[in-house]
Amino acid sequence: EAGVAQSPRYKIIEKRQSVAFWCNPISGHATLYWYQQILGQGPKLLIQFQNNGVVDDSQLPKDRFSAERLKGVDSTLKIQPAKLEDSAVYLCASSLGGGHEQYFGPGTRLTVT
Amino acid sequence: GDSVTQMEGPVTLSEEAFLTINCTYTATGYPSLFWYVQYPGEGLQLLLKATKADDKGSNKGFEATYRKETTSFHLEKGSVQVSDSAVYFCALSHFRQLTFGSGTQLTVLP
């Protein structure tokens, strides 16, 4: 069974630029999560989708971050414009449903200079 | 709100040493508790879990017991191997969302 795929694995941008991350969850998983993991900290949930609807985006900085999950499969997370404090690893996870075990992708390491 | 506090690292041990990584939590009600492991260059993997008080989760020689009276879920392994070198995260699940601790880096030397 293929795992959660993410791309790119690494990205370096300058502040005020925009960036997008892509996630392909495990086939059949209805729930998709995006986490932000700042160096030295645990992952923090940014947004949770159930199929193509948003379940929770309370910790998503909506003035600069956006996410979508068209057709209830792949998802993209965008940052526009980026700030220095956005430097982190962005993790995507998926599960059969809310409350089920989450499977994590390898993450995208973003560096904002 | 919910929170997880775990032992700060890094932790360095010799092969075959005994491992304990402390984890305590704050949450209302009865959360489920987890340990995740992150090997270099890989995503987080579920190591073990416990869903109610006094449950013991175990996997690959690792164990942790859900202690409600002390709100703890300490990770233990009797004899670590070099291949156990990784970052370990304690987490709780409440209202179907995960809250993570800050992680503990473990290095096992041959």
Image: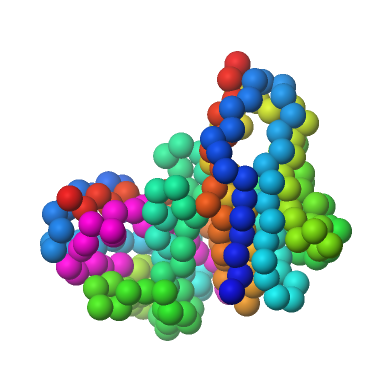
Say which residue appears at 72% left-offset and 24% top-offset: B17
Picture colour scheme? rainbow
Give the camera-side residue of A23 and B107. Answer: B107
The residue furthest top is: B110
Which quadrant of the structure image shows residue B30? bottom right
In this view of the protein, can residue B28 be seen by the observer?
A: yes
How many numbered marks does the figure carry?
A: 0
Provide residue A51's location: percent of width, then percent of height.
Answer: 46, 78
**Relative to A7, residue A33 above or below:** below
Give the camera-side residue of A24 and B92. Answer: B92
In this view of the protein, can residue A25 be seen by the observer?
A: no
Q: In the rendered view, does A83 fall on the left or right side of A108?
A: left
Provide residue A63's location: percent of width, then percent of height.
Answer: 25, 78
Q: In the rendered view, does B38 fall on the left or right side of A63?
A: right
The magenta region covers: A77-99
Q: In the rendered view, does A105 fall on the left or right side of A70?
A: right
Provide residue A98's location: percent of width, then percent of height.
Answer: 58, 74
Say which residue appears at 58% left-offset and 20% top-offset: B109
Say which residue appears at 67% left-offset and 42% top-offset: B21
Provide residue B9's location: percent of width, then percent of height.
Answer: 55, 38
Give the camera-side residue of B6 and B60. Answer: B6
Per the image, is A2 magenta? no
Q: In the rendered view, does B59 fall on the left or right side of A73?
A: right
Say which residue appears at 72% left-offset and 22% top-offset: B16
Give the camera-side residue of A67 and A80. Answer: A80
